[in-house]
Image: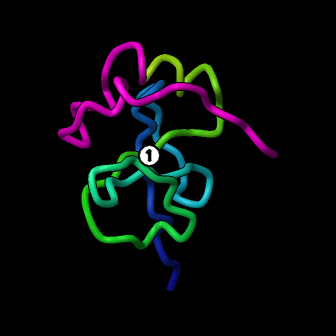
Amino acid sequence: MTHSVPMRRCVGCMTSFPKKDVVRFVLDEGRPVFDETGKKNGRGVYLCRSMECFDKAVKKKRISNDLRDEFESRIKSVEVTE
C-alpha cells in the first residue's frame, strides 16, 4: 500500500509542491514567523524556496490575505540562508 505525499501550494507562484519542499509561515502573537517544524498552531502560508516567489507574494499581498494580517507592512528586510 502506497501513501500519498502531502502537497502544498506556494502562494508566490501558485504551484503545488510536496510539503517537505516548501517553507511555512504562521502568525505567532501577531508576528509572522518561520515555522521550521511545519506543525505550529494557527493559519499558515507556504512558499517554495525561491526569493522570486517571496517577492511576488509580498508584492501581490498574498501573504497578508492568507494570514489575514498586514504582513507586508512589517517587512524591513529578509535574510536568506541556505
Query: 32 or 76: nearer the eye?
Result: 76
Q: Residues within 10 Å of mark 1 (few under 14, many from 20)?
A: many
Q: Residue 26: give x, y in percent of width and height.
A: 36, 54
Q: Quadrant of residue 53?
A: top right
For the image, the number of numbered tags is 1
Q: Residue at x 59, y 60 (%)?
A: 20
Q: Residue 48: give x, y in percent of width and height.
A: 57, 39
- In this rendering, would 10 be left or right of 51? left
In the rendered image, the residue lying farthest to the right is 82
Q: Residue at x 30, y 71 (%)?
A: 41
68 drawn magenta: yes
Q: Residue 9: give x, y in percent of width and height.
A: 41, 42
In the rendered image, the residue lying farthest to the left is 68
Mark 1 highlights which residue? 46
For the residue labelled by badge 1, is the local secondary structure a helix, a strand or a loop?
Answer: strand
Look at the picture and state if 3 lies above or below 10: below
- In this rendering, would 37 be left or right of 62? right
Query: 76 or 16: nearer the eye?
Result: 76
The residues colored magenta run 58-82
Residue type of the residue flagged with mark 1: Tyr
62 drawn magenta: yes
